[in-house]
């Protein structure tokens, strides 16, 4: 499967999700979407824990379970945001430097006491 084909999977960035997260995300997939993930996993990663989770959910759907609500392509809190982090306020950027006291750091056990 090329990167174009991978982008058509029901769960974006599927192969980078932890198994615990994947277990929750696949609950909203129908049998066809789940089948696509199983085929992709068998052809690429063949990670047994992932295949076990996918096949168990496929068995549940075959037994009459319904996909749950939710968006499998929704926000992924397990991934850090792509941006450079939170913006600093002027109060933060102009804060005075933190220096240890002139007699040393009292929390340092290696510092001799006098």
Image (cartoon, helix red, strand yellow):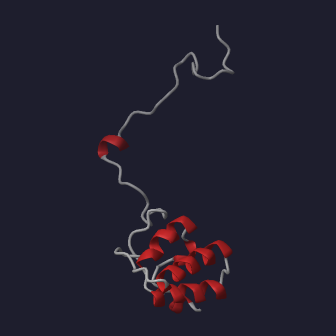
The residue lying furthest to the front in this view is 63
Q: What residue is at 50 percent from the left and 66 percent from the top?
A: 21
Looking at this view, is 83 or 22 the one in front?
Answer: 22
**Rendered position, 38 above or below 81:** below
Image x and y of residue 10, in percent:
45, 84
Relative horizontal placement of residue 45, taking residue 6 as reference (left or right) = right
Query: How many numbered circles are shown?
Result: 0
Q: Quadrant of the N terminus?
A: bottom right
Q: What residue is at 66 percent from the left and 19 percent from the top?
A: 111
Looking at this view, is 27 or 15 the one in front?
Answer: 27
Q: Quadrant of the C terminus?
A: top right
Relative horizontal placement of residue 53, taking residue 8 as reference (left or right) = right
Image x and y of residue 110, in percent:
69, 21
Image x and y of residue 45, in percent:
66, 80
**Rendered position, 112 above or below 9:** above
Q: What residue is at 49 percent from the left and 64 percent from the top?
A: 79
- In this rendering, does residue 8 appear at all? no
The residue lying furthest to the left in this view is 90
Q: What residue is at 65 percent from the left and 11 percent from the top?
A: 113
């Amino acid at each position: 499967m090329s990167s174009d084909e991978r982008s058509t999977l029901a769960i974006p960035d599927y192969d980078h999700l932890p198994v615990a997260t994947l277990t929750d995300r696949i609950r909203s997939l129908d049998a066809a979407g789940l089948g696509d993930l199983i085929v992709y996993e068998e052809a690429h990663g063949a990670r047994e824990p992932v295949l076990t989770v996918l096949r168990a959910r496929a068995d549940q759907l075959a037994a009459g379970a319904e996909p749950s609500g939710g968006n499998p392509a929704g926000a992924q809190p397990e991934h850090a945001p792509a941006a450079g982090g939170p913006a600093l306020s002027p109060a933060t950027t102009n804060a005075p430097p933190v220096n240890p006291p002139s007699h040393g750091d009292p929390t340092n056990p290696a510092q001799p006491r006098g």
